[in-house]
Image (cartoon, rainbow, N blue to C red):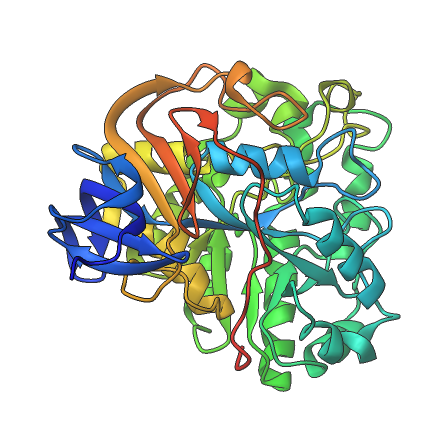
């Protein structure tokens, strides 16, 4: 009896499996990987020719701000996930600083409802910690569609803030899942605001939100996490000094860096981009950028997140510091990091760990993060040799711009496959948006 046909067959690609890269075929059935190897005689409803291309486990972006509800003029779930799919990203974790903020079961359920039939990739949503919902966090973090708890120790955008040690300690004492943290010290931010108050050059952004602002918060967080025996995930780490601290606390803390902090540097980015280079924590000088790369090489960094935080051009053009912090990044995460692979800054295997296996391991993503039998058929198909220019025109985000406009990169996403469905092929979305909610293991 002939073997049952596959739903999708990826033929002839160089596949990044747990054992390394090998030229094999992948058979997909019912959204999962059903066969790996030489499948020359197999048939399928759809075939994806992957000759001369690399097939990577689906890229997971664990930090995006899709702005819905309340701020849809900047972005929404539809446009944000479209940008993700076009950039080769198969799953995203959305942040809670919307209007209203995602701080309760009703707000989380509403976001999950809004994603239905509109999300191009799979998605989960963080619940934001506040001084008022601390006792509810153990229940909230277990709800379907919840990526975990997000805590802002320093004010950034939105109304979420848990600033003092007593409140931070209570958050860490309530719940079990890893808490994702924006670590900037609020007291120091307020003290130093006089540096930019009344108007300043955006180049002073990194002076106002200086190294000590980040280091102080991270040091406080680590001490409180140790006391509470709670795992924390420090987002968008930007300083050499923090990496030294975090290397000493690998039992408690995991580490994210962004493509922006690995690629841009001060003062050049502020000279070229003005307030469009403004993000929190700031882009810093070359010493810190090189320290981040050393931390990647040393294994201190656990994952890459884009911190996709779009604002309109009109908003970003406001006089600093009235201009909001944040820049888009979900669509450019993979092209930027592939270019670093091409330049020899990291290996393809390390990139896979930072963008697929790492997120699955840190957050307990069920059946995701590697190409193996029975796992979800999520693939980022890339051409490591293709040279392309990133432009504003390519960006699908509603904001319509990127800090990397005009940058030529080597390495480009060719197709995005989510649970066996080709959702992007050759820079074009395919079919209809049918992204679902990500599922997490109960032990995380």
Q: Residue at x 49, y 16 (%)?
A: 391
248 w.r.t. 234: above or below: below
Tell me the quarter of the image containing the N terminus.
bottom left
Could you say which quadrant of the image residue 343 lies in? top left
Q: Residue at x 20, y 41 (%)?
A: 11
- Asked whether the viewer can see residue 331, the reply is yes
Seen from the viewer's position, the closer of residues 270 and 34 is 34
Q: Position of residue 146 (x, y in %)?
A: 66, 65
Q: Position of residue 422 (x, y in %)?
A: 41, 39
Could you say which quadrant of the image residue 208 lies in? top right
223 w.r.t. 298: above or below: below
Farthest residue to the front: give it.
Answer: 1
128 lies left or right of 247: right
Q: Residue at x 49, y 37 (%)?
A: 85
22 lies left or right of 202: left
Q: Position of residue 371 (x, y in %)?
A: 29, 58
Q: Residue at x 11, y 51 (%)?
A: 38
299 lies left or right of 396: left
Q: Position of residue 338 (x, y in %)?
A: 32, 36
Tell me the quarter of the image containing the C terminus.
bottom right
């Amino acid at each position: 009896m002939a073997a049952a046909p596959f739903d999708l067959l990826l033929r002839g690609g160089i596949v990044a499996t747990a054992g390394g890269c090998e030229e094999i075929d992948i058979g997909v059935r019912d959204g999962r990987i059903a066969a790996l190897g030489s499948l020359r005689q197999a048939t399928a409803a759809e075939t994806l020719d992957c000759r001369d291309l690399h097939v990577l486990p689906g890229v997971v972006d664990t930090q995006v701000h899709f702005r819905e509800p309340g701020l849809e003029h900047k972005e929404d779930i539809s446009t944000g996930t479209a940008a993700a799919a076009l950039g080769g990203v198969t799953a995203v974790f959305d942040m809670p600083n919307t209007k209203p903020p995602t701080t309760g079961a009703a707000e989380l359920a509403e976001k999950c409802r809004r994603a239905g039939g509109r999300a191009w990739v799979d998605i989960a949503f963080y619940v934001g910690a506040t001084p008022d919902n601390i006792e509810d966090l153990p229940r909230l973090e277990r709800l379907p569609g919840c990526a975990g708890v997000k805590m802002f120790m320093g004010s950034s955008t939105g109304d979420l803030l848990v600033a003092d040690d007593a409140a931070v300690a209570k958050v860490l004492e309530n719940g079990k899942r890893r808490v994702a943290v924006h670590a900037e010290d609020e007291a120091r931010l307020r003290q130093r605001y006089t540096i930019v108050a009344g108007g300043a050059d955006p180049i002073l952004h990194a002076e106002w939100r200086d190294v000590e602002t980040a280091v102080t918060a991270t040091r406080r967080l680590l001490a409180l996490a140790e006391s509470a025996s709670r795992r924390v995930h420090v987002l968008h780490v930007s300083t050499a000094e923090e990496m030294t601290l975090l290397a000493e606390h690998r039992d408690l803390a995991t580490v994210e860096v962004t493509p922006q902090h690995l690629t841009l540097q001060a003062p050049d980015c502020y000279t070229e981009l003005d307030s469009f280079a403004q993000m929190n924590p700031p882009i810093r000088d070359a010493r810190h950028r090189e320290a981040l790369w050393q931390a990647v090489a040393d294994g201190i960094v656990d994952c890459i997140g884009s911190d996709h935080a779009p604002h309109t051009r009109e908003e970003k053009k406001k006089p600093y510091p009235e201009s909001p912090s944040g820049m888009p990044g979900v669509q450019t995460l993979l092209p930027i990091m592939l270019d670093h692979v091409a330049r020899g800054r990291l290996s393809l295997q390390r990139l896979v760990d930072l963008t697929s296996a790492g997120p699955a391991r840190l957050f307990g993503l069920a059946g995701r993060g590697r190409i193996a039998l029975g796992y979800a058929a999520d693939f980022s198909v890339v051409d490591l040799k293709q040279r392309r220019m990133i432009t504003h025109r390519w960006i699908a985000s509603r904001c319509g711009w990127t800090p990397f406009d005009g940058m030529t990169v080597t390495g480009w996403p060719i197709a995005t496959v989510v649970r066996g469905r080709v959702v992007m092929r050759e820079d074009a979305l395919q079919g209809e948006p049918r992204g679902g909610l990500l599922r997490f293991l109960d032990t995380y």
